[in-house]
Image: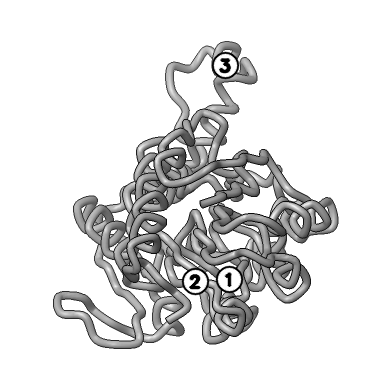
Amino acid sequence: MKITVLDSDALGRDLDLAPLNSVGEVTVYNYSNPEEVKERIADCDVVVLNKIKLNESNLGYAKNLKLICIAATGFDNVDVNCCRERGIAVCNVVGYSTNSVALITMSLALGLVTHLREYNDFVVSGEYTNSGIPNRLEPTFHELDGMTWGIIGLGTIGKKVAGIAQAMGCKVIANKRTPVCGYDIVSVDEIMEKADIISIHTPLNEGTKGLISSEKIAKMKKNAILINVARGAICDEKALAEAIKNDKIGGIGVDVYSTEPFGADHPFYEIKDNKKVLLTPHNAWGAYEARERLLSDIVENIKAFQNGEKRCRVDI
């Protein structure tokens, strides 16, 4: 089988893609712009991609394409209905990034709660050296013990974050469409009103797009922190930026954006230097160990397809 990797740079240049050679003849591209995508999918049997979009605008050029392997859990960048109509199988990978995303979620939250950026800047700037004072305790920071952590989306990642938050003394409340034994399941509105820290772990779909609206952001406590490691479009990004600029909330930690990378016209560009803001470049999923698991599962998805098996299929 001819396998084409469309955007290997998105998987990290340190990841060896050699395992793919065991399941086909592999061609690797670091990145593909829209016009290049049309040309590069024209003659292959399998496409491996991370962020590249496949839809009606380019799938018509793929005369031999049988399988799309998305190197991610989310598959909103691939038009699954269009693939279904064309008889193209689509696979994602689940569960590989749980530890990695939980790690970055906690890092963002802890960095904001402890004002780590500001304390680091105080030392690096030379102010600490020049102060003559052995310690500094401004801005004030608080322990997590006794705080309420709200989790929107109680899947595998949400549960992992919940466990860590509880271990640090937080009361956890969560939102999920169906009750989950052992968890306090509440509405999104209640989370926005009661939580000191809110982290988002829900997929992007028609039901969650714009879920964290300006109205919901307005319900947050003045010192509450919001962490988004799910999808950018789940939040009203302009409303979040305004809340930061007007000191309506305590801070935001964001790893995902409606446009990636975001441009100078994005609402977050204006607040990127704000001390209450931590922004990371959609890297929460990408610890090296997580990417190794991801690649291994892609190979298994291709093997299963070759053997007539259905594994991690999102088109059926």
Residue that badge 3 annotates = 131
Q: Residues within 10 Å of mark 3 (few under 14, many from 20)?
A: few
- Residue at (58, 54) in percent of width and height: 49
Q: Position of residue 204 (x, y in %)?
A: 53, 74
Q: Give the label, 2 or 1, closer to the camera.
A: 2
- Tag 1: residue type? Asp
Asked whether, in this view, residue 8 is left or right of residue 116, the answer is: right
Q: CA distance from mark 3 to mark 1?
A: 52 Å
The disc at residue 240 is none
Q: Position of residue 81 (x, y in %)?
A: 58, 83
| Residue 270, visible in the rendered structure | no
Residues under numbered marks 2 and 3 in contact, where contact means CB atoms less than 8 Å apart: no
Q: Residues within 10 Å of mark 2 (few under 14, many from 20)?
A: many
Residue that badge 1 annotates = 76
| Residue 127, visible in the rendered structure | yes
Q: Quadrant of residue 78?
A: bottom right
Q: Nearer the viewer, residue 308 or 176?
A: 308
Q: Residues within 10 Å of mark 1 (few under 14, many from 20)?
A: some
- Residue at (42, 81) in percent of width and height: 316
Q: Which mark sits nearer the N-terminus, 3 or 1?
A: 1
Q: Which mark sits nearer the N-terminus, 2 or 3?
A: 2
Q: CA distance from mark 2 to mark 3?
A: 63 Å
Asked whether, in this view, residue 102 is left or right of residue 59, the answer is: left
Q: Is residue 157 above or below residue 276?
A: below
Residue that badge 2 annotates = 89
Q: Nearer the viewer, residue 23 or 183?
A: 23
Circle 3 SS class: helix
Counting every numbered tag in the picture gives: 3
Q: Is residue 143 above or below residue 180?
A: above
- Residue at (52, 12) in percent of width and height: 132
Q: CA distance from mark 2 to mark 1?
A: 15 Å
- Residue at (42, 66) in percent of width and height: 201
